[in-house]
Image (spheres, grey):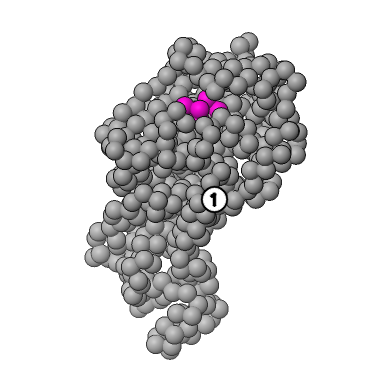
Amino acid sequence: MSEITGFTADSAAALPLYVLDREQFAAWKQGQPAATQAWLASQGFTAGAHSVALLPGTDGLAGAVIGVGDRGDAYSYAHAPHALPEGSVWQLANELPAAEQALLQLGWGLGSYRFDRYRKRNRAPAQLVAAPSGEVADLIAASLRVRDWVNTPTEDMGPQQLEDAARALADAHGAQVDAITGDELLEQNFPAIHAVGRASHRAPRLVVLRWGKDTDPALVLVGKGVCFDTGGLDIKPADGMRNMKKDMGGAAHALALAGLVMARGLPVRLTLLVPAVENAIGPDAFRPGEVIATRKGLSVEIDNTDAEGRVILCDALTFAGEQKPDLVLDFATLTGAARIALGPDLPALFSNDDGVAQQWLQAGDATRDPVWRMPLWRPYLRYLSSGIADLANAGSRMAGSVTAALYLERFLEDGQRWAHLDVYAWNDGERPGRPAGGEALALRSAWAMLKARYA
């Protein structure tokens, strides 16, 4: 997986870097030589958000200014590694509060990333003289893991590779991993996971990671691991299938968050559950109109085989509730309806607990890694009614993200505290610090929420 890049300990060739917003820049500029002031004025540079000005010297570059907008947002700094000259080395030249220095480092690490598993980078990022350590380094690493896992095509990121990722995290942090694979899912009563994944030549599985002390509060993280989604027999059109390697984005988020929990030593008894399948087309594919069993004992009529994520999650959520945890969090690239409602940048948060929802919303505001709460409007369960089973996996086109969340809620224990995040896990285009492709959304705010709750 990608290593953290963009940092160096060698300051011998470092040039001064001024990190300023518009107000700070106006005051700083007045203290500069007249030639520097004229140079900046000739470019119309005002240190606006995501801007860069190179400062000339007698022998070449004398320094640079990067303009930032919201100083509390790591992405305000993330343009710098690829806006500054390739391979150049920079050292912070103006004072920043410790919190802003941490955000500068976080943004620099995120902005230095490019997915380079299959081709060389076009260019190296500029280097910052700094050594991110502790929480900042762990946050960068977790975010890059999500990007790498989501960006990796399915031939190299199938159910086995998701299991391998969990095992690598377990090895790094002293956790235990079990995998219930293939027909073992039927033997151990995970029939819904098996039904979705049985058509693929790659066996479906439930990956279970456990870590922590028995005396600590129990936390269960669940991630949708659909490694590729054809839509099944309700096949997606070409445009809809093109990027379905990313349909394991929920699993990527849950895995990365579990890594953060373990790396930071959060005092919880952690269980990570990743139902990992490929929703393939073949002679044994599950069919529209089929009624499948679930671990909960509820029967589900398959209205649409392209609503498969909730079907694998329902068995995992039932198993999560059996652990009697303090909190269950699930992450899933679940519905296009959430994207229509909120766009690509705002994950849709559903929760049956106002306290948990408010904690996550507050963490999102503080970290500039937002979520947006959506309603669990239970009268809409009528859209999941079935004439022959306890419920259907889909039905109406109305309130699609709400009905998906309501479906999931049916498989929880009564009174179980739970939050569900419907996340896109993707950047459709290039933005400063956010290359096109896989993206970690609400990962940092999820961590901040858990830290506030349990640390």
Q: Is residue 318 magenta?
A: yes
Where in the figure is residue 374, as x and y percent of width and height?
A: 63, 48
Most foreground residue, 191 or 279: 191
Q: Judge from the rendering whether residue 320 lies leftward or rightward of residue 301; answer left or right.
A: left
Above or below, 67 relative to 200: below
Residue occupying the point 34% across, 37% down: 269
Residue depicted at 68% across the width and 48% down the height: 341
Front position in the image: 384 or 40: 384
**Left/right of residue 333 with respect to residue 97 in the rendered view:** right
> Against 193, is 68 above or below?
below
Residue 415 percent location from the top left of the image = 52, 38
Q: Nearer the viewer, residue 317 or 145?
A: 317
**For the residue carrying disc 1, how many other residues have a C-alpha within 10 Å: few (<14), some (14-19), or many (20+)?**
few
The answer to whether residue 255 is seen in the rendering is no
Q: Quadrant of the N terminus?
A: top left
Mark 1 lies on residue = 354
Q: Which residues are magenta?
A: 314-319
Residue 19's spot in the image, x, y percent?
41, 71
Q: Main secondary structure of the magenta part?
A: helix
Q: Is residue 47 visible?
A: yes
Query: Residue at the spot x=56%, y=44% of the render?
Result: 351
Tell which of 300 and 44 is nearer to you.
300
Secondary structure category for the residue under label 1: helix
Q: Position of residue 141 (x, y in %)?
A: 37, 46
The relative height of residue 208 versus residue 30 in the rendered view (above or below) is above
Please say whether residue 329 is one of the residues in the magenta stretch: no
